[in-house]
Amino acid sequence: MPRAATTSDVFNAIAEPQRREILVLLRAGERPVTELARELGMTQPGASKHLRVLREVGLVRDRRAGKQRLYGLDARGLRPVHEWAGGFEKFWNESFDRLEAYVQDLEHARREEQR
Amino acid sequence: MSATADREVVVSRIIDAPRELVFEAFTEVRHLSQWWGPEGFTTTTRSFGFGVGAEWDFVMHGPDGTDYPEWITWTEITPPARIAMLHGESRDDPNAFVSVLTFEPDGPVGRATRIELRTVFATRGLRDEAVEKYHAIEGGRQTLGNLAAYVAGIAGRGGEG
């Protein structure tokens, strides 16, 4: 099934403000699309479209409950964001550790040269 | 700065060395290759230039053998105080992001350097979530650690369901 490149990963999926609103609402528990649409002031087809994107990237799961379909948060899908964000900070903290050791060695070496 | 404040994150450090020297460590590949990346990472440089518009094209090798293509172009250089760079995986990377490094004298006689990396994201999506909804800013200082804690919290709640 072809998918739009702009929504095919979790980072792009949560870059859209209305999709983040949906995730926030779903933190409180499962909801049918009609409720989500009403609370967010959007059309039901609009809400459905966002839910489809969120489901495709693994942030939302759905199940049938009687006559309606309920959508719930599956926040394990945010793990790539978590790992990336933590990794980014770690990258620079560890780089700065190495930078400090390196410039201190450099400083010592130059002092030695000047003697 | 206010135009981008809503999609910035900051990592900073005090380094016990003069800022001219800390700055110099960014200016030549023989320096950069000695410290760039986390412990255990090495780099292989394809081409390097240090100047506004010049590029650093390199591959970063992870300790597990993974290779990461990296590409940086310098967009502002003000020795020894400031370096701005566009950082991505390649020249045409649409997800490349701008980082600004600032170097300030620190300590009683300016013997140390406060280095700060301020990264500006292409969208403010990730930051908005933390700032507006969960008040993740602590003392006005936003870090990626806050965001990481926030998404970890979300992931934890999701796991309960």
Image (cartoon, coloured by chain):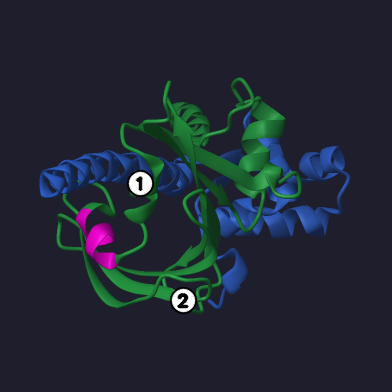
Find chain B in the image and tell me its colour.
green
Report the amino acid beneath label 2.
Ala
Report the amino acid beneath label 1.
Val
Image-based side of A7 in relation to B19, left or right: right
The front one of B25 and B11 is B25
Magenta residue check for B120? no
**Does the image show residue B46?**
yes
Q: Quadrant of residue B67?
A: bottom left
Q: Nearer the viewer, mark 2 or mark 1?
A: 1
- How busy is the neighbourhood of tag 2: few (under 14 within 10 Å), some, or many (20 plus)? some
- Establish if A115 lies above or below B63: above
| Cβ atoms at labels 2 and 1 below 8 Å apart | no
- How busy is the neighbourhood of tag 1: few (under 14 within 10 Å), some, or many (20 plus)? many
In magenta, the rendered stretch is B29-34
Q: For the stretch drawn in magenta, what is the main secondary structure? A: helix
Image-based side of A27 in relation to A41, left or right: left
Q: Which chain is blue?
A: A
Mark 1 lies on residue: B22
For the residues labelled 2 and 1, the Cα–Cα distance comes to 20 Å
Kind of element beneath mark 2: loop
Magenta residue check for B30? yes
Mark 2 lies on residue: B54
- Establish if B126 lies above or below B27: above
Task: Residue B17 in the image: state x and y as whole percent.
Answer: 31, 36
- Establish if B135 lies above or below B58: above
Task: Residue B128 in the image: state x and y as whole percent.
Answer: 68, 40
- Establish if B32 lies above or below A81: below
The front one of B89 and B113 is B113
Q: Which mark sits nearer the N-terminus, 2 or 1?
A: 1
